[in-house]
Image (cartoon, grey):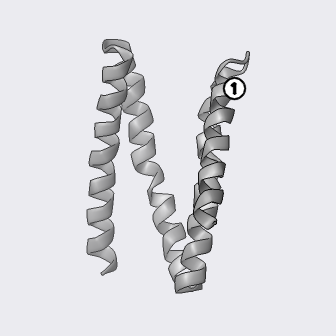
C-alpha cells in the first residue's frame, strides 16, 4: 500500500508540472520538483528505520546534494544555447551524474 501512495504522489507531481508548464507562469513548473515530496518520504523512512542520528546525517548529505542540481541547471543553461534541447538535457544529466558521483565518493571518504 505504501508503494501505491508513493506512485500516486509522483503522478500528481508530474500532472502539476504539466499543468503549470502551460500557464502564463510556466516557470513555476521548475519549482514543483523542488518541493520536498520525496525527501519527506525518504526522511520518514530513514528516521523510522535507523533513528534520528541517521536522519541528521541524511539531512547534511541532502544539503550537499544541492551542488549536483546546481551543476545540472548551470550546464543546461549553457548547453541550451549551443545544442538542440534533447542533447542539452542529456548533456546536463551527464554533468549531474558526474557531480553526484564525485559527491558520493567524497562523502564516503569523509564519513566512513
| Within-10-Å neighbours for mark 1: few <14, some 14–19, many 20+ | few
Q: Position of residue 37 (x, y in %)?
A: 64, 54
Say left or right for 54 vs 82.
Answer: right
Q: Position of residue 35 (x, y in %)?
A: 65, 48
Frontmost residue, 55 versus 8? 8
Residue 111 vs 6, above or below: the answer is below
Frontmost residue, 7 versus 74? 7
Q: Secondary structure at mark 1?
A: helix
Say left or right for 44 vs 93.
Answer: right
Q: Position of residue 110 (x, y in %)?
A: 31, 74
The total of numbered circles placed on residues is: 1
Frontmost residue, 47 versus 18? 18
- Examine the image and state in which quarter residue 40 appears: bottom right
Which of the image's four quarters has the N terminus?
A: bottom right
In the picture of the structure, the residue carrying the numbered disc 1 is 19
What residue is drawn where x is 31% and y is 62%?
104
Residue 23 vs 107, above or below: the answer is above
- Examine the image and state in which quarter residue 80 appears: top left
Q: Position of residue 56 (x, y in %)?
A: 55, 76
Which of the image's four quarters has the C terminus?
A: bottom left
What residue is drawn where x is 33% and y is 58%?
103
What residue is drawn where x is 61% and y is 37%?
14
Amino acid at each position: 500500500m505504501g508503494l501505491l501512495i508513493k506512485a500516486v504522489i509522483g503522478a500528481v507531481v508530474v500532472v502539476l508540472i504539466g499543468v503549470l508548464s502551460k500557464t502564463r507562469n510556466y516557470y513555476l513548473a521548475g519549482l514543483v520538483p523542488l518541493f520536498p515530496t520525496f525527501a519527506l518520504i525518504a526522511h520518514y523512512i530513514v528516521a523510522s528505520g535507523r533513528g534520528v542520528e541517521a536522519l541528521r546525517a541524511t539531512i547534511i548529505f541532502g544539503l550537499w546534494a544541492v551542488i549536483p542540481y546546481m551543476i545540472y541547471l548551470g550546464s543546461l543553461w549553457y548547453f541550451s544555447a549551443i545544442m538542440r534541447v534533447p542533447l542539452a538535457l542529456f548533456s546536463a544529466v551527464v554533468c549531474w551524474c558526474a557531480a553526484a558521483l564525485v559527491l558520493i565518493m567524497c562523502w564516503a571518504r569523509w564519513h566512513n
